[in-house]
Image (tube, rainbow, N blue to C red):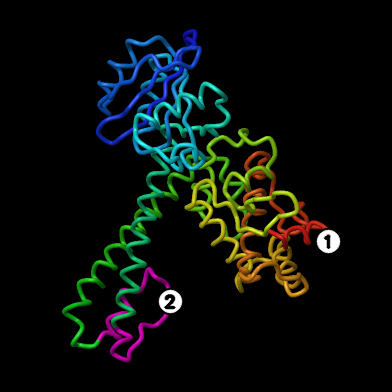
Amino acid sequence: MANISTMTIGCDLGDRYSHVCVLDGAGAVVERARVKTTPAAFKRWFGRHKPARVAVETGAHTRWVAAELAELGHDVLVANARDLRLIYAGRRKNDQLDAEALARVARLDPKLLNPVTLRGQRAQADKAILGARNQLVEARTKLIGCVRGMVKSWGRRVKSGDANAFHKRAPEAIPEELRPALDPIVETIEELSRQIKLYDELLETKLQEYQESVAMTQIKGVGPVTTLAFMLTIEDPSRFRRSRDVGPFLGLVPKERQSGKSDPELGISKAGDPYLRRLLVQCAHYILGPFGQDCDLRRFGQRLIDRSGKTPRRGKKRTSPKKRAAVAVARKLAVLMHRLWCTGEVYEPLGYGQTCTEDELAAEMTM
């Protein structure tokens, strides 16, 4: 990379146009501009500036913008938009001021931007398959709920079962009067199920391209979708010094708002990828459910549920013991998956280091 100048550039990305603000080494504004949000326009404007530190926010255009600027020799910092309260919670907010704020924070201390690492092109393309599949699953879920609700208003009920076979069970419960309205929806559900099955087959093929995934699929309840989502979200396991750091990265640890003697009990931070977090919690529910394998994770969750009645309540609202246990198991599951990914060891359901002392168990109950 070329030598970086003392200039700092903040870039507020917009869908049509982006605003940039250039600061010199002393922090004075030397230039403001509005640049069309296209590769050609960015290459033309940033190409005539010396390599500098450039701060941009996460967004729809961030990936190609960061790649374009890096190719021109700039030092690109991708700021986590969720952590920039200085910008989105300010009294005065417009695109020019946002660009200047990005530049000033990047000049003062880049760590304040909580910069994120963008995925590689291959990982992003494979993760797009997961995202597309998830959109179809959510659409099918809404349509199934629509059919169930309309059928209930006629005093009937569609039998419970696998969503993949809903289109086979639904016709017998639909009254003749509702067939003109619901038959097209049932056909759409059938087509969505077929497309989801094709995505599942594609993901099975993709999983074989990642040899490290074999270690994680040893855990009963963790399938190809969760494994791929975990690997593609993290991408590089060495980015974490300890496996325990995966929990905070995925938002599976409580938020903190301690001040003086005040230390309220809060929910999880929900940072990181919400899709992966939801998948891990679903796996945790399976592990704790009737079909879950006897393992340290399951025993840990059961102990949390059993102890819940002995723990004093704090605050008016409190999540159910099973949900709290599922989140705790999901956090430990993420740690376990990262550990298996790094070591490639054979997973032992009992005795793989997932035991928990009484003090640690009590600490989990406060989360």
Front residue of 85/151: it is 85
Q: Which residues are magenta?
A: 151-174
Splitting the image into 4 quarters, where does residue 55 fall? top left
Q: CA distance from mark 1 to mark 2?
A: 39 Å
Q: Position of residue 288 (x, y in %)?
A: 63, 68
Above or below 341: residue 148:
below
Disc 1: which residue: 358
Going 70% across and 67% down the picture, which residue do you hit?
A: 314
Examine the structure image and report whether residue 114 is included in the region drawn in magenta: no
Residue furthest to the right in view is: 358
First along the sequence among labels 1 and 2: 2
Binning the other alpha carbons within 10 Å of mark 1 as few (below 14), some (14 to 19) or many (20 upward) gives few
Going 32% across and 10% down the picture, which residue do you hit?
A: 48
Amino acid type assigned to the residue bearing label 2 in the image: Gly
Q: Position of residue 136 (x, y in %)?
A: 33, 58
Which quadrant does the C terminus fall into?
Answer: bottom right
Above or below 366: residue 166:
below
Q: Position of residue 279 (x, y in %)?
A: 51, 56
Residue 161: numbered disc: 2
Going 28% across and 89% down the picture, which residue do you hit?
A: 154
Q: Secondary structure at mark 1?
A: helix
Q: Nearer the viewer, mark 1 or mark 2?
A: 1
Front residue of 113/260: it is 260
